């Protein structure tokens, strides 16, 4: 193979071009970043690269490949979103991108996208404009248009090119949900032309570029969807059905709170109704419109908040280096213990799972297997990885294998005496450096640490259930917890893929503390005669994943009752539980797990209608009177956000950012509202205080506004001052 003079990189920034035998290999490797992102500088350079490919007649074909280990292109740099001061500005950016990608599509030479790793958003839109796409058969290779998750729509032609490539329904499935498509699936649906082993990606891509240039290879058209699919999609009447179904489904899912998926749908539809050019115009216009919505701003905030949390050391400077955690011991192989083990082995940690009896250990191990198996079934991991992960976990009924544990996490019964007993026992067998973390949901870590000979090693790791699905981890520190313990625990939580907030010790920590007055208030509404379904519906409409009464059924009525009692003991009358919940607890109903709760459950635990017989237990009986959604939302949500403000005032959480992330990721506070603090800011603190005072007049003293809110209202302050992002 002869090598022609390698063209010098156009600009020594993110893109370098090497030409061999007439094929240009353009490598995207954004300096000082772990992933490739698109921003204005990269766009300029991209334009120059296209100029070069257009101009240099010795070049006959090109390959676009990434220099990063596990990403092709992760999409637009989210910082660009901060520039969207008006719809026009955002629309213009979208138009410029569209024009650039049109140029790429119609370039003199064919361009092959060689995709390994994440190919997201604008990254996928670039690939869509290339002549040919090759993906690697690797779990890290995923393709998606996740724009709706930031409240916008694909703005660089994605709404027009994707449906034409993979069919309408496949495209809508990706565009309206933002979900990931694995490499193999992408290949099956025709999104990728070829699927190869990562080791040969570059070589195959160069060969294909040459063949396309020579005219010896054409793109194979493999639009999937089957014959029936084609029948439905290939004519306007069929498409109308697809669009109307998609709209219905989207509205059902978003409950009207998220405008972006509907806007994306409209952009796609426009392209079919008119033509691609008009579709592109509409795409840009709607991108502009969406980019300045409040919903998008809140979702972008959550993105920045999550990113900034990842870099937060969690302790005051100077922060020590975290110690490595390679082996952990877990006490209690129940629901949570097994859940924690299942995420730990997936990160390559050696796990010893201990319970009191063999049978429970066996059940725990089976539960771990179940979770990991699901990943295999979904093809997110290979068979080999599955086997490797399961060999990492072993079970025991004594402390064998704990002698070299770096971290022990206890998830035994929620009982202080039991927690003390296991702490004392385990400290006898582990090295002095071993961290002891409790997954308690209600017991203050300080009280657990009283049994410890090394309280500096004791910390809380409050996981949420189910552990493998819930993204939040509350790390709870006591005044005695050392900085080393804290940073190591945080680092390990992040390794497990969790978003970690560090909170100070106190009853309910953060998430459960703000949940408590909210659940109580729902109970007081029941005391007053509100129908169960009205309460749940009002809060589901507000944007919670489920209403509070359903939540109590899910969590367990007994568990909620116990937690409520602990909170009442700690905070007095303000958190006094409702009569309704107490009565139901006393009656022995436990909710979904016991198939008897506020709702009916079938044999498989599937929820049905309200169990009317429960009203006989409640103070106002079956006599229910309708209640305004607004009153329901006002009382429950204000109870929650007021408590959130108190946790900031008390120093439980360190920043409003942590409180917002904790509420959204831990208890499902509506993401499009940004979290309790963002919600209070957008309503205005003065208006929140006014409402709280009005409620407190009616129901003293539980709506007494937090002092911090009174002060802020007086000074006209916000939790996030104007112009600050997180
Ligand atoms: P579980 O009842 O499913 O599991 C507890 C396990 O601990 C049982 O298998 C039991 O045999 C075992 N155990 C009891 N004493 C032991 C001992 N001395 N040595 C070894 N194992 C012992 O309970 P679950 O739900 O897993 O809860 C565990 C902890 O996690 C509790 O502190 C709970 O408050 C907390 N938690 C629970 C959440 C949930 O949603 N279930 C959420 C967050 C925290």
Image (tube, rainbow, N blue to C red):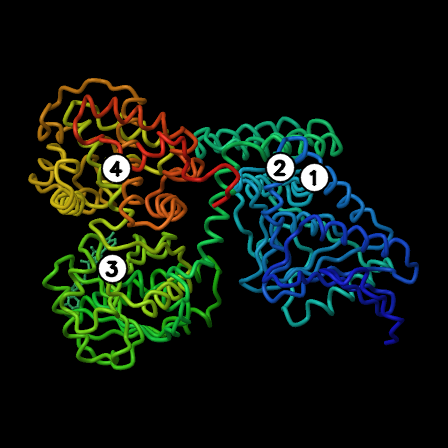
Q: What element carries label 1?
A: helix
Q: Is mark 3 within 8 Å of ligand 1?
A: yes
Q: Which of 432 and 724 is in front in this view?
A: 724
Asked if residue 222 is positioned above or below residue 695 in the image, the reply reads below
Query: Which residue is at the far front?
Result: 715
- Say which residue label 2 marks: 84
For mark 4, does the 10 Å Cα neighbourhood hold few (<14), some (14 to 19), or many (20 or more) residues?
many
- Say which residue label 1 marks: 93
| Residue 142 rendering spot, x and y as whole percentages | 57, 56
- Say which residue label 3 marks: 439
Q: Are marks 1 and 3 in contact (CB under 8 Å)?
A: no
Q: Are marks 2 and 3 in contact (CB under 8 Å)?
A: no
Query: Which residue is at the far right?
Result: 57
Ranked by sequence position, the earlier of labels 1 and 4 is 1
User: Residue at image x 28%, y 50%?
Assistant: 652
Q: What element carries label 3?
A: loop
Q: Are marks 1 and 2 in contact (CB under 8 Å)?
A: yes
User: Residue at image x 34%, y 75%?
Assistant: 327
Q: What separation in Å lies between label 3 and label 4 (alpha carbons)? A: 24 Å
Q: What element carries label 2?
A: loop
Q: What separation in Å lies between label 2 and label 3 (alpha carbons)? A: 42 Å
Quadrant of the displayed image that contains ligand 1: bottom left
User: Residue at image x 21%, y 24%?
Assistant: 531
| Residue 575 rendering spot, x and y as whole percentages | 17, 38
Q: What separation in Å lies between label 4 and label 2 (alpha carbons)? A: 39 Å
Q: What separation in Å lies between label 1 and label 4 (alpha carbons)? A: 44 Å
| Residue 236 rendering spot, x and y as whole percentages | 66, 28
| Residue 307 rendering spot, x and y as whole percentages | 49, 53
Ranked by sequence position, the earlier of labels 1 and 2 is 2
């Amino acid at each position: 193979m002869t090598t022609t003079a390698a063209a010098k990189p156009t600009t020594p920034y993110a893109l370098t071009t090497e030409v061999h035998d007439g094929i240009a290999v353009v490598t995207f490797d954004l300096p000082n970043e772990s992933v490739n992102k698109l921003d204005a500088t990269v766009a300029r350079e991209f334009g120059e690269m296209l100029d070069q490919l257009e101009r240099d007649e010795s070049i006959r074909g090109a390959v676009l490949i990434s220099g990063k280990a596990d990403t092709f292109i992760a999409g637009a740099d989210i910082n660009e979103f901060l520039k969207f001061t008006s719809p026009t500005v955002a629309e213009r950016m979208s138009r410029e991108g569209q024009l650039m990608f049109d140029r790429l599509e119609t370039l003199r030479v064919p361009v092959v996208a060689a995709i390994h790793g994440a190919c997201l958003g604008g990254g996928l839109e670039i690939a869509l404009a290339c002549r040919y796409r090759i993906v690697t058969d690797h779990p890290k290779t995923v393709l998606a248009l996740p724009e709706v998750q930031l409240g916008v729509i694909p703005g660089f032609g994605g709404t027009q090119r994707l449906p034409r490539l993979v069919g309408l329904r496949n495209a809508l499935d990706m565009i309206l949900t933002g979900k990931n498509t694995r490499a193999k699936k992408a290949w099956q649906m025709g999104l990728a032309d070829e699927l190869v082993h990562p080791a040969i990606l570059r070589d195959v891509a160069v060969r294909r570029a040459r063949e396309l240039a020579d005219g010896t290879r054409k793109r194979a058209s493999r639009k999937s969807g089957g014959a029936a699919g084609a029948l439905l999609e290939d004519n306007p009447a069929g498409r109308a059905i697809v669009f109307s179904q998609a709209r219905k489904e989207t509205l059902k899912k978003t409950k009207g709170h998220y405008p972006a998926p509907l806007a994306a749908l409209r952009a796609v539809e426009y392209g079919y109704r008119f033509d691609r050019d008009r579709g592109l115009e509409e795409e840009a216009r709607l991108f502009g419109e969406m980019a300045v919505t409040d919903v998008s701003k809140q979702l972008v905030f959550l993105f920045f908040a999550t990113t900034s949390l990842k870099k937060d050391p969690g302790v005051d400077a100077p922060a020590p280096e975290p110690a490595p955690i390679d082996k952990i011991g877990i006490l209690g192989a129940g629901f949570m213990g097994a859940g924690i083990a299942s995420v730990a082995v997936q990160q390559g940690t050696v796990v010893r799972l201990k319970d009191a009896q063999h049978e429970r250990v066996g059940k725990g191990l089976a539960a771990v297997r179940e979770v990991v198996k699901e990943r295999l079934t979904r093809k997110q991991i290979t068979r080999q990885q599955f086997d490797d992960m399961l060999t990492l976990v072993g079970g025991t009924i004594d402390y064998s294998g704990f002698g070299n544990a770096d971290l022990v996490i206890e998830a035994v019964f929620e009982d202080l005496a039991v927690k003390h007993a296991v702490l004392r026992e385990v400290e006898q067998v582990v090295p002095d450096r071993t961290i002891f973390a409790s997954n308690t949901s209600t017991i203050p870590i300080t009280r657990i640490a009283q049994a410890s000979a090394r309280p500096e090693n004791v910390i809380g790791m409050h996981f949420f259930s189910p552990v493998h699905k819930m993204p939040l981890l509350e790390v709870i520190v006591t005044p005695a917890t050392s900085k080393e313990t804290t940073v190591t625990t945080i680092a390990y939580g992040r390794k497990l893929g969790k978003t970690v907030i560090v909170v100070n010790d106190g009853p309910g920590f953060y998430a459960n503390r703000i949940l408590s007055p909210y659940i109580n208030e729902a109970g007081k509404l029941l005391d007053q005669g509100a129908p169960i379904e009205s309460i749940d519906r009002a809060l589901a409409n507000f944007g919670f994943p489920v209403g509070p009464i359903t939540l109590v059924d899910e969590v367990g009525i007994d568990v909620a009752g116990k937690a409520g009692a602990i909170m009442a003991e700690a905070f007095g009358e303000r958190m006094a539980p409702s009569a309704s919940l107490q009565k139901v607890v006393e009656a022995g109903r436990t909710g979904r797990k016991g198939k008897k709760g506020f709702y009916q459950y079938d044999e498989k635990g599937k929820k049905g209608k309200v169990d009317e017989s429960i009203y006989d237990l409640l103070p106002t009986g079956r006599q229910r009177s309708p209640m305004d959604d607004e009153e329901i939302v006002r009382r429950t949500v204000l109870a929650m956000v007021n408590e959130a403000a108190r946790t900031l005032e008390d120093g439980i959480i360190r920043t409003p950012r942590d409180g917002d992330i904790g509420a959204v990721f831990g208890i499902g506070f509506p993401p499009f509202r940004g979290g309790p603090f963002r919600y209070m800011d957008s309503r205005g603190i003065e208006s929140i205080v006014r409402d709280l005072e009005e409620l407190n007049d009616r129901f003293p003293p539980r709506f007494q506004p937090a002092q911090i809110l009174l002060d802020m209202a007086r000074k006209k302050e916000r939790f996030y001052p104007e112009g600050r992002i997180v």
